[in-house]
Amino acid sequence: MGKVINAVLFFAQFIKNPRQLGSVIPSTGFLKRRISNSAKLSTANVVVELGPGGGGTTRHFLGAMKADATLLTIELNEGLYKLVSQIDDPRCIVHHGDALDLIDILQHYGLPAPDVVISGIPFSTMDPATGSLIVESIHRQLAPNGRFVAYQLSAQVARLATSFGDWKTLQLELLSIPPMRVWCWQKASGADD
């Protein structure tokens, strides 16, 4: 019953502010598995999730992570932040704030450069300048060889991720409503921070 209530609350938040959410319904299990496999969560020590929504992806990611890893979630929408805050796992830090403040948020919690940043925030509905700032911040903060995984309906994030160079992979998850693109970039091992 909890999943149904969370889905209803998620939909209500979409109705209130559709530009903040990338989909009208939470992510499917197929999409969650594709994201966690692309991100190689089982080897990561520090993971950042931008836009965890109602927490379904967060719970899945925690299940795929090591017992001593840390997951920092950053959610802008207050209603969804309250849902994600209900997750009871000592590895999970839930932060109510803006992805633009990634640098300050990592410093606030004393976290090192993340191995993975996963983003479900809808780059296609935000101002391109804001989107570019977020992607640049992700690139700067990632550890060498760190991965940036973005699951998106549109290709806008690929147009913004120029700091990662040409190397990227793209997978399409058709068993998602709507079907989603899963982009993955890896920061070069010698890239400047």
Image (cartoon, helix red, strand yellow):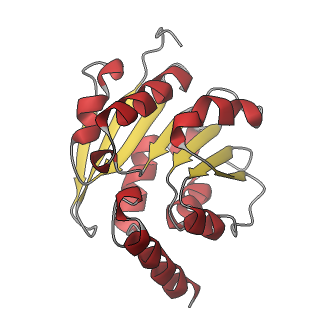
Task: Tell me: 92 left or right of 36.
Answer: right
In the rendered image, which quarter is residue 84 located in?
Answer: bottom right
User: Percent x, y for residue 176?
Assistant: 28, 67
State the residue in front, 150 or 18: 18
User: Percent x, y for residue 1?
Assistant: 56, 91
* Relative to 136, residue 81 above or below: below
* Relative to 56, residue 95 above or below: above
Residue at screen point 45% across, 42% down: 39
State the residue in front, 100 or 176: 100
User: Percent x, y for residue 82?
Assistant: 65, 68
Task: Tell me: 88 left or right of 181.
Answer: right
Residue at screen point 51% across, 79% down: 9
State the residue in front, 67 or 101: 101
Q: Is residue 114 visible?
A: no
User: Percent x, y for residue 12?
Assistant: 45, 78
Residue at screen point 40% across, 41% down: 149
In the rendered image, which quarter is residue 48 located in?
Answer: top right
**Quadrant containing the C terminus in the rendered view:** top right
Residue at screen point 69% across, 43% down: 69
In the rendered image, which quarter is residue 78 located in?
Answer: bottom right
* Residue situated furthest bottom in the rendering: 1
* Relative to 132, residue 97 above or below: below
